[in-house]
Image (tube, rainbow, N blue to C red):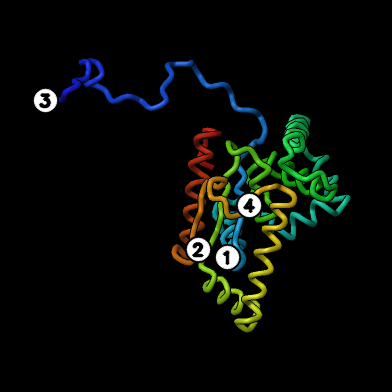
Amino acid sequence: MDDFPLPPEESRESPRHGFQGDRGPAPPAAEFPAGLTVAVSREAGSRGGTIGRRVARNLGWQVYDQELLEYVSQEGPLHQELLDGLPPAAAAWLGQRLEQLLREQSVSQHPSIVRLARAILALAAQGNVVLIGRGAGLLLPAETSLHVRLVAPLADRIAYISQWLRLTVEEATERVRLRDARRAEFLVTHFHRQPGEPHQYDLLLNSSLLGEELCADLIVHAARAKLAVRFGRPQ
């Protein structure tokens, strides 16, 4: 027999951690972002780009990799066309989000980075898009984005880069080192974040152990689940 028996009402039901009573219905979700964004961060050679494109294909969404994000943000007419195509409510959300990020010093005030952030937020406002690289997941609200990090052992990443770019092992090793260093420097300088911090991601996947197809399937499953929770629809 316990030395300190529970009262009868407590012994019948386990306590619900964090339960604070019925607060009524949840407030309605904001109109924008209108859908989910999958943001892919990756170590060099972890096949994050390939996996991100596979995710977009499986979901039927648009995909913007690092190069395309840079192009959209810096090409004047295209950048303006993207902004002009937003509904007024989406443009208002973009402005408020960007102002908040700048106020909190979560993003650099360098003009090129502000343009990049504006382009990423414009794409995210419309939703149903996969963004690869450029710190996209650090700019977006957690509620309407799925932030994914792809990693792999260094030896596997070097071997992949060596085969893909037809480099010697020594050349591939240096290429991986430089890419990782540049990406980390970009995030630290302009977003004040370390790419290796695991708690900023929804999913952290080892592409060497899981393979491209399973990584993509897991991301798609998580995206659909988060869509159902946030927007009441699986896709």
Q: Residue at x 59, y 51 (%)?
A: 60
- Whether residue 8 is visible here, answered yes or no, is yes
Between the residue at mark 3 and the residue at mark 1, the CA separation in whole angstroms equals 58 Å
Q: Amino acid at mark 4?
A: Gln
Of mark 3 and mark 4, the one earlier in the sequence is 3
- Whether residue 87 is visible here, answered yes or no, is no
Q: Residue at x 38, y 27 (%)?
A: 17
Label 1–label 2 contact, CB within 8 A: yes
Of mark 3 and mark 1, the one earlier in the sequence is 3
Q: Which residue position holds label 2? A: 207
Front disc: 3 or 4? 3
User: What is the number of the mark on residue 194?
Assistant: 4
Q: Quarter holding the N terminus?
A: top left
Q: Image check: 72 left or right of 47?
A: right
User: What is the number of the mark on residue 191?
Assistant: none
Q: Which residue position holds label 3? A: 1
Q: Position of residue 88 (x, y in %)?
A: 78, 30
User: What is the number of the mark on residue 47?
Assistant: 1
Q: Amino acid at mark 3?
A: Met
Of all residues, the one furthest to the right in this rendering is 76
Front disc: 4 or 1? 4
Front disc: 3 or 1? 3
Label 2–label 4 contact, CB within 8 A: no
